Amino acid sequence: MRLGKLPRREKSRVKPLVRYMSATVSGGFAPPPVPASYERADVVASWPMLDNDTIGDCTIAAVGHAVQLWTATVERTRVMTDAEALAGYEAFGYVPNEPDTDRGANAVDVLTRWNGAGFACGGVTDMLSGFCTIDPTQQGEVRAGVAWLGVVYAGLELPIAAQRMDVWDAPASDADLIGDYELGSWGGHAVPIVGYAPDGVVCVTWGALKQITWRFWSAYASEAYGLLSRDFVAGTGSAAAVDWQQLAADMQDLREGIA
């Protein structure tokens, strides 16, 4: 299995989830409740690998899996092809059959491109409506992002120990996060978080669902983003949870390169 997420890079114009979820809009604003558990991944019959077993395109594979879940939820399923995933990765400098160019990508750069130029997915150019930061240390924000928006795009600094785990878990003590459990000792990986429960979250990686305990998440999640898809929120009735006017203004600033 391959990784491919480069170290976190900040963009000051990417704002936090609370900016869009707690604003007062016409007629008042009441964010929807967050359930104790949430998962819609059962609407997807199978998840494609999207070449992430041979190249470090996890940041692009996560895009494809997010779109697949959103569109399956609203019964308009689109599935990214391997060729589309490859084309997306090539936009960040990868050249097929030139291993030295297989260097991965920054998560925030991928999301910025998705919001601007878009990525091909199932024969259609998919445009992200917007994205925002989520504090990975705040479980409540992670749950809200998944429950309200369907997907949280996450960056993990995986330890070598993760290579041999069916469920990604971590030692109870920070003092034991050494050796094979050392932060990032395997490398950076991007995954879409598509569900959660009292004991952890669920992601899609390498063509399958993966369970992650909250302890592992706390130890190894380095960045997280809420993804805003108009198709998804319209189809699930959660559009009222988002201040779209503010989001549109912020995303325009980002597209114009204002830092």
Image: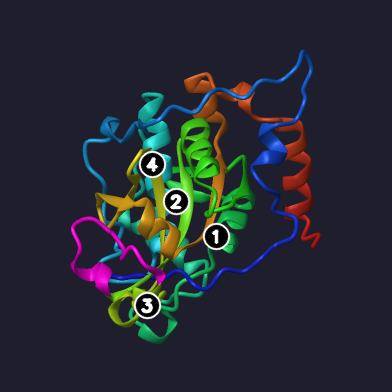
Please tell me which of labels 1 and 2 falls first in the chain: 2
Q: Is residue 180 above or below residue 198?
A: below
Look at the picture and state if 130 lies above or below 51.
above
Is label 3 in contact with label 4 (beta carbons under 8 Å)?
no
Query: What kind of element bears circle 4?
Result: strand
At x 50% / y 73%, what residue is drawn? 6
> Which element carries disc 1, helix, strand or loop?
helix
What residue is shown at x 28% (from left), y 79% (from top)? 180
- Closer to the eye: label 2 or 4: 4
Marks 2,4: beta carbons within 8 A: no
Residue type, label 4: Val
Secondary structure of residue under mark 3 = loop
Please tell me whether mark 3 or mark 2 is closer to you in this view: 3
Q: Earlier in the sequence, mark 3 or mark 4?
A: 3
Residue 10 seen anywhere in this rendered image of the structure: yes
Say what amino acid the circle numbered 1 marks.
Val
Q: Which residue is mark 4?
A: 194
Where does label 2 land, which residue? 63
Q: Label 2's element?
A: helix
What numbered label is drawn on residue 182?
A: 3
The span from disc 2 to disc 4 (Cα, nearest Å) is 12 Å
- Please tell me which residue lies in front, 183 or 4: 183
29 is higher (above) or lower (below) than 125: above
Inter-mark Cα distance, 1 to 2: 9 Å
Q: Is residue 233 magenta?
A: no
Kind of residue at badge 2? Val
Gap in Å between the C-alphas at discs 3 and 4? 26 Å
Q: Quadrant of the N terminus?
A: bottom left
Secondary structure, magenta segment, majority class? loop
The stretch of residues the image draws in magenta is: 161-174
